[in-house]
Amino acid sequence: MLTLGIDTSGKTASAALLDTETETILAESALYTQKTHSQVIMPMVKSLLEQSGKAMTDIGAVAVAAGPGSYTGLRIGVAAVKAMGFALNVKCCAVSTLEALACNNIAYKGLICSVMKARGDIVYAAVYRSDCYSLATVCEERLMSRDELAEILAFNGNEVMLCGDGAADFFSAYRSPMLLIAPPQGRLQNACGVCLASLSKELVSPDELEVSYLQKVKAEKDLEDRNAKA
């Protein structure tokens, strides 16, 4: 089966094609862009298919990074995947952005910590154990302070590879011989990781896809503030 993976959760827009039978990435494209992902992602998908000699009708499933990440970016990605799912009559898969990041570095045997910037000193983070082929969750993804994450990693007592857009800042702030950092190509979101993470996920109908923000969006916070004042 041919799986199309899409990631619009951060500043990098990315798409990839995975042959699930041979577990081969047939094509991938990533662009660190200031443009709105809605302007970039579908032309990227079209180009990817053309260059790999595939057609939209060849796609058997579509996977997407469903969060955490940029509110706008996540909505764009999930909406695009839902539209393709309905148009192609194929099932879809929602993948954690943090798990996809870890999958980008799955060749590292040991603990992988995916850390993404949220706001201020707060990050989205999760810890996984890699055997170079699959991941096992050690610390569930959640919103936490960098100090809290540092305590979790220190308590574990093992070397940890950091990845994600918050990895470099965390590595600099909490320097330790137990901390490693992924190389640049494995540090930011990439749809290859989305495709790999989708291999262990259940496919669902497009209307079942949901975004996972891990924190309340601004509209929800504003509503709570208004209700509290009332």
Image (tube, grey):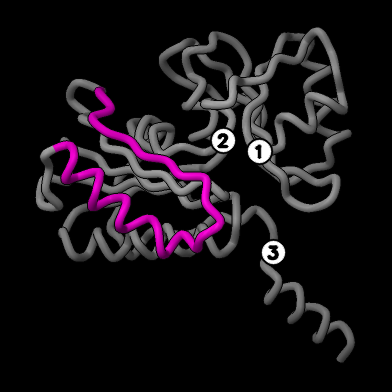
According to the picture, the residue beneath numbered tag 2 turns out to be 188
x 42%, y 58%: residue: 77
At a point 16% along the width and 59% down the height, the residue shown is 89
Q: Which residue is mark 1?
A: 165
In the picture, which quadrant includes the N terminus? top left
Give the Cα separation between the discs numbered 2 and 3.
23 Å
Q: Which of disc 2 and disc 1 is earlier in sequence? A: 1
Q: Could you tell which of marks 2 and 3 lies nearer the N-terminus?
A: 2
x then y, percent, for residue 205 = 28, 58
Q: Position of residue 50 (x, y in %)?
A: 16, 45
Give the residue at mark 3: 216
User: Residue 37, percent across and down?
Assistant: 46, 59
- Report how many numbered discs are placed on residues in the image: 3
Secondary element at image label 1: loop
Image location of residue 174, percent across then percent down: 86, 23
Mark 1 and 2 residues: CB-CB less than 8 Å, in contact? yes
Classify 42 as above or below 172: below
Magenta stretch contains residue 205: no
**Around disc 2, counting alpha carbons within 10 Å, would you say few (fewer than 14), some (14 to 19), or many (20 or more)?**
many
Q: Which-is-in-front pick, marks 3 and 1?
A: 1
**Amino acid under label 2?**
Leu
Give the quarter of the image for residue 53.
top left
